[in-house]
Each structure stands twice: as C-alpha cells, then as structure tokens.
Amino acid sequence: MIMMQVCVAQNKLSPELLWKIARVSARGISKDKQYLIYTVSIPDVAANKFTKKTYKMPVAGGEPVEISNADELLVNESISSDGKFKTSNDEVLINKVKGSDKYNDLPLSNAYVINSLMYRHWDEWADGKFNHVFFAPTDTTTKTVAKDIMPSLPYDCPTKPFGGDEDYIWNPDSKHIVYVTKAKSGTEYTVSTNTDLFEYDITTGATKNLTEYNKGYDLNPAYNKAGILAWLQMKRDGYEADKQDIAILYNGMHFNLTADRDDIHVEGFKWSDDGKTIYFNAPVNGTLQLFKIDHFIITKTNFSGTISQLTKGNFDIAGIVGEVNGKLIISRDDMNHAPELFSVDENSGSMVQLTHTNDEFYHHLMLCKTEKRFVTTTDNKSMFEWIIYPPDFDPAKKYPTLLYCQGGPQSALTQFYSFRWNFQLMASQGYIIVAPNRRGMPGFGTQWNEQISKDWGGQVMNDYLSAIDDAAKLPYVDKQRLGCIGASFGGFSVFALEGLHNGRFKTFIAHDGVFDFRSMFGTTDEMWFEYWEKGGAYWEKDNAVAQRSFAQSPSNFVDKWNTPIMIVQGGKDYRVPIEQGQQAFQAAQLKGIKSKLLYLPDENHWVMKPQNALVWQREFYNWLSETLK
C-alpha cells in the first residue's frame, strides 16, 4: 500500500501539498479476473514531471504489489479474437505542408504552406501527418508488412486531439475492424463535428460507413460478446455539446437507447461481461452517478432496455473499469478526495474502497464541508449550486467569497476533483466558494443545457448574479469581499461580469477566457464551435442571432471596467488564442485598472507542468490576498 507521509497534525490543503497527492488511474482487470491493475502517477515538482508506477491488487481489495508486466496480465484489445491479427496506429505523411517536405533541397526550412483550415488544433500546428490504423499477422515468422486500412486518406484515427486506442476495435468475428474518423479535411473539417464509425473488411479491403445516417458525433465503439455494437452519439452536426446518447447497431438497424430520457447525458459506458447489460455514468444534480440498461427487449425490428440508477451520493463516478464477481469496479472522487478505485454492488449500490493510495495524506488533512443549495433565478427557475466552506468554518465569522464560473460552456459542474480549480484548496485558504449550475449544465434537462448557446451574455449572466446575490445574504458571507473566478467559458464569464457587475465584486481572475468575439472567430481552431455558439459569422449583417451574439462580446463593455483583474493565458492555447488574454490585459492597463498577466508560453488550454501549476496557484492566491483584503 502506498502511504504518503507528507502531513502532520491536521493541516489545511496548500498548493504545495496538493502537488504531493498521487493520482490513481485504472488500467483494467486481469485476464484471469483475479487482479485489478492500476497506475499511480506521483508529481515530481523538482524534476517538473510525473513518476509512474503500476500495481496489481486482488479484485476484492488487499495489499497492492508493484509490477512491471501489466501488459502481460491484461487482455490485449489490439489482438483479434482468433489471435491471428494485431492492430496498431502510426502517423503517415499525406499532405506536404512544411517547406522541408515540399522542397527536398531545403531541409532546414521551417516554413508552413497553408491552403485551408484547420492549420492548427488545440496546441499543435498541422504538419501534414495523419494518424492511421494498421493491422498485421501476430505470427512474427511471416514477413507481411503491416497494412494501412486508411491508405492516402487525409483523416485521423485515432482522432485528434484526444482520441486513443479506443477509436479502433475488432469485431468479435476477427474479420472486421471498426474505427472512428471524421471523413473530412481542410476547411470542411473545421466547421463539422460529424465523426462516423467505419467498418473495414480485412479480407476484401472494403470499407463501409456504419453511421452515415447520423450527422453529429459517433464515438467510443464497443462490441459485446454477441457482436452487438454500441457507441456514444450526438445527433446534430456542428454542436459539440449536444445530448449524448448510447446507440446500438443490431440486425442491420440502428437504435438509440437513451433518447427518451431528456435528463440523461451519457459520459461513458461499458458492456457487462455477459453482454446483457450496459453500464454508464451521467450527471445528476451536481454529481456523476452510475446507471445501467438491462432487461433488453430484442426482436427483429426493436432493441430497447430498462434504465435504472445504481448509485446516489455526493460524489462522482468518474469512470467504469469493468465487472468482476457480480461487482463493478469504478473510479470515484469528490471535492475533498482525488480519484480512487471502488467496487459497487449492483443490487444495493453500496461501495467498498479498493485502492487507498492517499488515505494517509487525507488522514492528516482538514476536509471541507460541501452543501447543496437551490437559488431562484431572474426568470423564476430553480438553479442548483454547490457551496464549499473553509475546513475550520465558523458561522459566527464573515468570510470572503468567490463565485466560480464553470467552463464548457456546456460541461457538468459536479463533485469533480481538480488539480488546478480545486475547491478544497480554495476553501482551505479561507474562502467560501459558490459554484452554480447555471444555464448550459447537463443533468437538468436538454432545455436547460441548451439555453446558453447563442446567448452567452444573456440569461446565464443573470444566473451568475442571482447566485452571488443569494450568497451575499448569508450572515457569514462578507459582501464587501466578493471575487469572481473562472477559465475558458468561465474566463469569458469573468470578462463579461467585469462590465456589468455594478460594484458587486472586488476582484476578478480569468484564465484562457474569450474577450473579443471577432478576433476569436478569426483565430480559433474549431469553427464548428464558433458557428454554433454564435449562430453565424460576424459579417452576416442580416443574421439577427449572430449580430446579437457578437454584440455581447466583453470587449464591447470595457468602458464599464473598473475592478482589479488578473488574466492568465497559455501560449499554446489555440482554442482560445493568446490575443484574447493580451487584449484584456492591455485594456485593463490602459484604463489604469490594477491588473496582472500570467503568461504560460508552453501551456495549452490547461496547465500541465508541475512547476507551472505551482506558479499558477501561488500567483492566484497572492492576487486574492492583495485584492480581497
């Protein structure tokens, strides 16, 4: 068992302590169903990296043992069921974009010749190489060269930037490979979210589009043992935050198993070992809970099942590892605890903690109370929010309070444990945190989730103000010391609220936020997002929706800015490019507003390197100390 002797007595969480917490992630369940295999990543701040160790432990719990042969113990998903073939992926140069590739006599050229979008994505520039899937015989005595199943295609599988080995799988018949790709390139690629599932026949070389009928995302394919294919699906092209459902291909027909449940937005799923149940997690009232679909009704023309919720509580079921001995292995966390692995009894929903990687750490740490609260919005709706209290909270005192603005814009605000936007860490510095599930949060119905699109500066801003105004009435909230913080859409929210808060807040912090809608539209990478969220382009003068959207740009309201603001910007963030933070900082400085720019040249939309993360947190809390006195 890993014990972290880093605390004495009852400590409050600090940035330095946060970066001693080990990070647990499951690898899977061993082939013989005897062991749970997992990895522990330990931050090494001095070396600015992570040290990883892999362990096995009995599936029912017990003492972990460090191992070096994890791949031998786990099922190799890259090998076909009959054991004859193996898949892999590699980059293939398709388009000559770099000067050194176009002109052999200029090998030192670092020029890019660009003819279309998307020429950069997330945190890297497109270099003309694409991820392709290959297969080859497992018999190493043959001299067969691995075959590219996507020859000459300017498409990616695994998909970029976040796809992995889960993007291509074997059919149990061992004759077909199903893979995910967006069959578009160039400018057409950047305005569409239409990924599809393609089936490649390894005997004939023929490829068939299995999801041509669906125009939105099709992702994460998985077969059960009977050869029934399930996957995650969104319906509308261009809408990256559409309701996500579980789709099925059975008997040549397509079925959606969760479409009728307006309240369900599926995060991830896994088949049971016998193929008769699908387990999935989804947001519910500010948490992520575990569900199942079973009691399938299967006919020649129908495939349906019964949906039931298995767990309840103030925690997140963040991932489903697998099933063994009638129990599910899951990853669970909450606002006070980093992820650990648990088993769940399917019948009762009761849980047993299996990994105890950070138990000793938390034994010496003061935890924070989290409280559910409902707030009435300006349009008379009931809005859910979390309030997080300092670990030594005294209701007789008054505390500075922070309004947390979630990113996304359509991402669930649940009991997540972040190593940057860490509510326990914030509260441990003496702040009360108000975290509202404003418009655009899944888990409260499709209408609530969609009311944010094309109206970023509208009702959602009123939701934020309703949340902080309600909190300000609490006797232990110091309404003279209110701050507002957030990243991504939350960073935009900070910029927007700076121009309309009417003296409510004393300080702001925005990380990688959208400041100017026009320059964002002209420099960001994923244009499907911009077209959907704004309702069109800024030059479409007859498009009333688009014109209203662009009129809501925070840059239009800088004349009303008058409150100290700290701005954080990643240099390799091509989703919210550098000029967004630069423009906001420049405006604040020229207006004589107390302001600070934290520039992270090697970071993307997040902060990945330990030392940069510690700089981020130290500057974050230094700023709050300076401005919420």
Image (cartoon, rainbow, N blue to C red):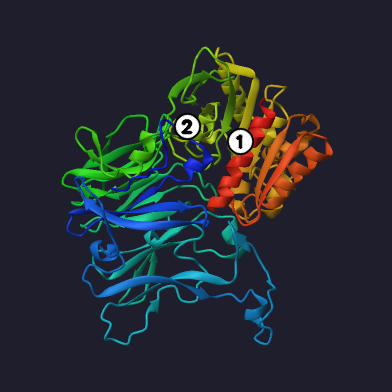
Q: CA distance from mark 2 to mark 1?
A: 14 Å
Which amino acid does the dot numbered 1 rest on? Tyr
Which dot marks residue 551? none
- Residue 337 in the image, given as x and y percentages of width and height: 39, 37
Residue beneath the point at 55% across and 50% down: 238
Q: Earlier in the sequence, mark 2 or mark 1?
A: 2
- Residue 58 in the image, given as x and y percentages of width and height: 20, 50
Q: Secondary structure at mark 2?
A: loop
Nearer the observer: mark 2 or 1; the answer is 2
Asked whether, in this view, residue 259 is left or right of residue 240, the answer is left
Q: Which residue is mark 1?
A: 621
Residue beneath the point at 57% across and 16% down: 398
Which dot marks residue 12? 2
Front residue (pair 193, 34) = 34
Tally of marks = 2
Q: Is residue 69 above or below residue 594?
A: below
